[in-house]
């Protein structure tokens, strides 16, 4: 039986979580942000520098329910989460310290609309050394963690789920394409995208 998404949990306070995160940041230095999904191809903020980066102990997974950005409460979609285990290649962005107060509210409204992610600072390896960057992670205990979904459920979600920023399928496909441009081959994501109805049709033609 296909697991049903858990009901939306009691909402945490995004403003309080932003304040806590900013209190952990050393304002004497620029802020680094680690992107592993749509932040790579649509950052929507001004940054001074970007670098390819890798984090150890975490991996990218399309295993978080989305009821706003890529789905609705009636038809939840999926977005990427950073889960414990393995490693993840992505991009880090350097935001100049004087720009941080104007950048963070918009970033928070996008990534933390329901305060589902657990923001944390992770060591990211880059070609020019290691930086401590803010990353949006997810606990497997979160009601928004999907757990293991059967392949037919991914096919259904790719076909049906749409939120304020578009479909789950377009989101996952855009991320995959940008990763390929960076020379990153995410085999797990490629396998999931092959389950999408349109992609399966294209493969048969």
Image (tube, rainbow, N blue to C red):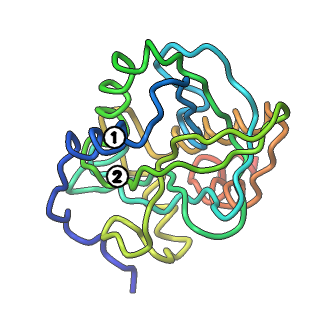
x and y percentages locating residue 92 in the rendered image: 64, 33
Task: Give residue 108's quadrant in the image.
Answer: top left
x and y percentages locating residue 50 in the rendered image: 68, 23
Secondary structure beneath label 1 = loop
Residue occupying the far left of the picture? 10
x and y percentages locating residue 27 in the rendered image: 45, 27
Q: Nearer the viewer, residue 38 or 199?
A: 38
Residue positioned 51% across, 77% down in the render: 148
**Pointer 2 with pointer 1, Cβ within 8 A:** yes
Residue occupying the far bottom of the picture? 1
Secondary structure beneath label 2 = strand
Q: Nearer the viewer, residue 99 or 6?
A: 99
x and y percentages locating residue 109 in the rendered image: 29, 32
Query: Could you tell me how far apart the alpha carbons at marks 2 and 1 are, in whole angstroms?
Result: 6 Å
Q: Residues within 10 Å of mark 1 (few under 14, many from 20)?
A: many
Residue at mark 1: 69
Task: Give residue 5's quadrant in the image.
Answer: bottom left
Q: Quadrant of the N terminus?
A: bottom left
Q: Is residue 192 left or right of residue 121?
A: right
Residue positioned 71% across, 54% down in the render: 190
Q: Is residue 87 above or below residue 179?
A: below
In this figure, what is the number of numbered marks? Answer: 2
Residue at mark 2: 66
Q: Residues within 10 Å of mark 2 (few under 14, many from 20)?
A: many
Q: Is residue 94 above or below residue 119?
A: above
């Amino acid at each position: 039986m296909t697991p049903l998404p858990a009901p939306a949990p009691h909402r945490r306070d995004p403003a309080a979580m932003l304040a806590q995160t900013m209190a952990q940041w050393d304002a004497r230095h620029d802020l680094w942000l680690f992107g592993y999904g749509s932040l790579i191809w649509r950052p929507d903020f001004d940054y001074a520098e970007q670098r390819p980066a890798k984090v150890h102990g975490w991996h990218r997974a399309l295993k978080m329910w989305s009821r706003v950005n890529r789905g609705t409460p009636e038809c939840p979609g999926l977005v990427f989460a950073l889960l414990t285990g393995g490693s993840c290649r992505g991009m880090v962005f350097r935001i100049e310290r004087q720009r941080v107060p104007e950048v963070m509210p918009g970033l928070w409204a996008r990534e933390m609309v329901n305060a589902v992610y657990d923001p944390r600072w992770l060591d990211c390896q880059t070609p020019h050394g290691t930086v401590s960057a803010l990353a949006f992670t997810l606990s497997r205990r979160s009601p928004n963690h999907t757990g293991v979904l059967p392949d037919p459920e991914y096919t259904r979600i790719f076909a049906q789920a749409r939120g304020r920023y578009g479909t789950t399928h377009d989101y996952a496909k855009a991320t995959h394409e940008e990763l390929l441009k960076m020379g990153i081959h995410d085999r797990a994501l490629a396998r999931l995208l092959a389950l999408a109805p349109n992609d399966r049709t294209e493969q048969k033609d």
